[in-house]
Image (cartoon, rainbow, N blue to C red):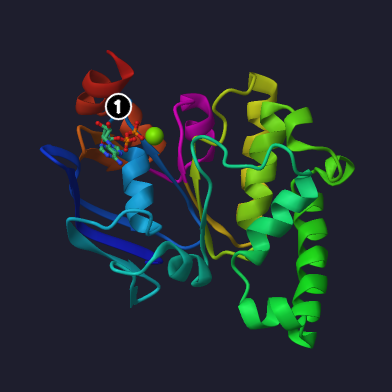
Amino acid sequence: MLVQVKGLTKTFGGLTAVNSVDFEIEKGKVTAIIGPNGAGKSTFFNLISGFHQPSSGSVMFDSTDITSLKAHQIAKLGIARTFQTTHLFEQSTVLDNVLIGHRLRTSSGLFDAIFRTSRLKREEKESLEKAHEVLEFVGLTNLADKHVSEISQEEMKRTAFALALATDPTIVFLDEPAAGVNPEETDGLAELIKKMVSKGITVCLIEHKMQMIMNLADKIMVLNYGQKIAEGTPEEIKKNPAVIEAYLGG
Ligand code: ADP
Ligand code: MG
């Protein structure tokens, strides 16, 4: 298993947002997490990616215990993520957003920045090549020089994918990648996710759009009030009485 989560729990004051969740992600597959608003889905991602520290439980990635690592350490190991609300610099270009995201994760420190070492120059060149490569991959080459404030919601989603891909991740966690985009654009984003998988990237996504999930996911986990209430293939999940009651509304 690429990711192995055991007994993962997060409490905020008196609220248990994620409650003893056991979960595994298989390499090369698409795994989806669904559940009502407030079920703990985004918190689950925050725990795996190191943005929150778990109250208890463990997260293993490729046989490394990453439970107590910080977000930037986890990113360096090959785990990338996007956020439910896109975190982009609106006044910068699409290309610069990808470059900033990439540089934040490369190794040059303050010394390199001040003395403009040859290492820094090499890294800048590599960052630029990488940024162009991922923009082409997500279909945004033509918009590289546009400001983020001028592009559509769907193009922002693609930019967020590009940021995630710029780090050459083994796995990407996508938090509601198709929220706020129309059905046709949703199909386009689903195609892009399939293209990532065909390049060998493992994908785990949170999404409310059931048709998209049913079409993409190899496995689905259902969260409700922080607990895993079901897990299985799309076909199994559709028939599960607990899921129908909690989520699909009968
Ligand atoms: P989902 O993504 O499934 O909609 P979240 O993981 O965002 O749910 O939230 C789960 C629960 O945890 C909610 O009740 C939410 O209010 C709470 N929560 C999330 N983040 C925090 C935080 N940083 N501080 C306090 N409560 C939080
Ligand atoms: Mg959420």
Image-based side of 198 in relation to 92, left or right:
left
Image-based side of 35 in relation to 114, left or right:
left
Which residue matches tag 1? 239
At which x and y percent is residue 164?
60, 54
Residue that lies at the very extreme toward the bottom in this rendered image:
118
Q: Residue at x 74, y 46 (%)?
A: 138
Q: Residue at x 27, y 36 (%)?
A: 223
Q: Looking at the figure, which quarter contains the N terminus?
A: bottom left
Q: Residue at x 36, y 57 (%)?
A: 48
At which x and y percent is residue 135?
78, 51
At which x and y percent is residue 60?
32, 69
Camera-nearest residue between 201 and 39: 39
Q: Is residue 10 magenta?
A: no
Element type at mark 1: helix
Q: Is residue 11 visible?
A: yes
Q: Is residue 207 magenta?
A: yes
- Which of the four quarters of the rendered structure image does ligand 1 lie in? top left
Q: As displayed, is residue 71 above or below residue 77? A: above
Q: As displayed, is residue 196 above or below residue 62? A: above
Q: Residue at x 74, y 38 (%)?
A: 91
Camera-nearest residue between 235 and 72: 72
Camera-nearest residue between 187 and 16: 16
Q: Label 1 amino acid?
A: Lys
Span highlighted in magenta in the image: 205-220
